[in-house]
Amino acid sequence: MTDQEITMEKKSIFTPFNIISAIIIIVGLVLTYLRFTKGLGAVTNLDDTNPWGIWIGFDLLTGVALAAGGYVTAAAVEIFGMKKYHSAVRPAILTGFLGYSLVVFALLYDVGRPWRLPYPFFISQGVTSVMFEVGACVALYLTVLFLEFSPAALEWLGLKKLRSLIVKLTIALTILGVVLSTLHQSSLGAMFLLAPSKLHPLWYSPYLPVFFFVSSIAAGLSMVLFEGTLAHRHFRHKMDEAHLAEHDNLAFGFGKAAALVLAGYFAIKIFGIALGNNWHYLSTPYGLWFMLEMLGFVLLPCFLFAIGTRDRNARLIRVSAFITVFGIFLNRINITLIAFNWQLPWDERYFPSWMEIGISVFVVTVGLLVYRFIVTKMPILYEHPDYKQEH
Amino acid sequence: MTDSIHTLQEFMFHTKGILYILAIGFLIGFTWFWRFLHKYDREE
């Protein structure tokens, strides 16, 4: 093969990823057309008994939890002064920003009249509703994330004055981000306090807001590691020396933090069972499923993180991060779908239609494509040469 | 276990009692976990 042929092959857009993405995008656009012309009933299995499906359980609840890496990393570096993890801030902020953007994007599909999303802010404020609090925090935090992300875009566009103005707000934005995240991560759990008779007692607890908030920290730490692993594999050529050098140290630092957070999360979940005196449910099929979630996707990654950190085994830490990310997904799906309406007969239970799953896959694919575009064009995995002295 | 609980007071007494035992157990366990996690840090 000549050099010219090799160059041609490298520049080809017909890679397996691109082809699969194109198919998903086309199918997703068709499903989008069906959703917005025929209504929710045409594409979903949702009904009055099961008004929340995977667009809430996966796209919204899992998406928000996994996007927590933005505030966790920004707080560690900007507030707690852990400057050695500085290279992780921009990728984490980008993941958070895209995560929240996709949450709002997916919400447009799920709500009956999406054009009324701004109503709670401008027309009819339901300030006593938990959902208002979630909506307000998500909207404000998305704005904060946009501002936190914007220096990278402004460096790419060459707008130095505007960039320097926004960089001066970094500490204020980080504090605001932590406050807003604490509020809405916990409020997402608080929404389920409204349904004590519908959610299985092993998952229901008056402390659900605390569970959601603590688990979001573990999710954020794990997602930064997981996303870093993927970026290291696919965008290594975009990384500068600092990113490559800090890659393993980041895994050891975040792995240790994740081990401690997961240990605490496991403890408070057990306290939750004790407070509700729900031990007898553990011997039921739902109890076995609950124990699988707790032992397999909380306690196991907790120990794997600990062993990986102690033995300086970055590979083990990354495997643990993947298990934790899946565990968070499982927890949110359990709360919204599997353990929800658990007393209903099976024929009345919800199972997503293929079109609902198709739109969720479409949303994730859009996120991946936007992520790839931004990482390829903007200084996310490397420092812009014009601003190196500023760190 | 639940058969002996008839009143709210008995329920609170029972669950809080177990919770105190669990909390002490976890504090001891967490100390061990912390030492396990930082074992090689101390040796360095």
Image: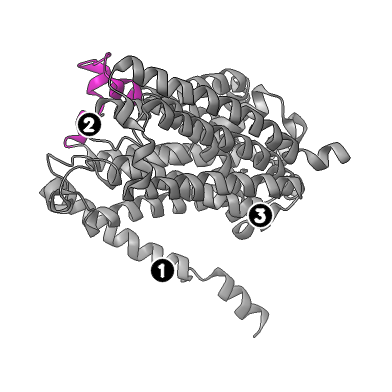
Colouring rule applied to residues: one colour
Q: Kindly indicate whether the residue at mark 1 contacts the one at mark 3 (C-beta within 8 angstroms).
A: no
Q: Label for residue A69?
A: none
Q: Quadrant of the C terminus of chain A?
A: top right
Q: Label for residue A197?
A: 2
Give the foreground label among 3 and 2: 2
Query: Along the line of sight, which residue is nearer the eye, A184 or A176?
Result: A184
Q: Earlier in the sequence, mark 3 or mark 2?
A: 2
Please, is residue A245 above or below residue A86 in the view? below
Residue positioned 73% across, 53% down in the render = A313
Residue positioned 52% across, 22% down in the render = B20
Residue B23: percent from the left, percent from the top? 56, 25
Can the viewer see residue A156 in this picture? no
Q: Quadrant of the N terminus of chain A?
A: bottom right
- Residue at the spot of label 1: A19
Give the residues in magenta. A112-135
Secondary structure at numbered mark 3: helix
Q: Label for residue A316?
A: 3
Residue positioned 26% across, 39% down in the render = A108
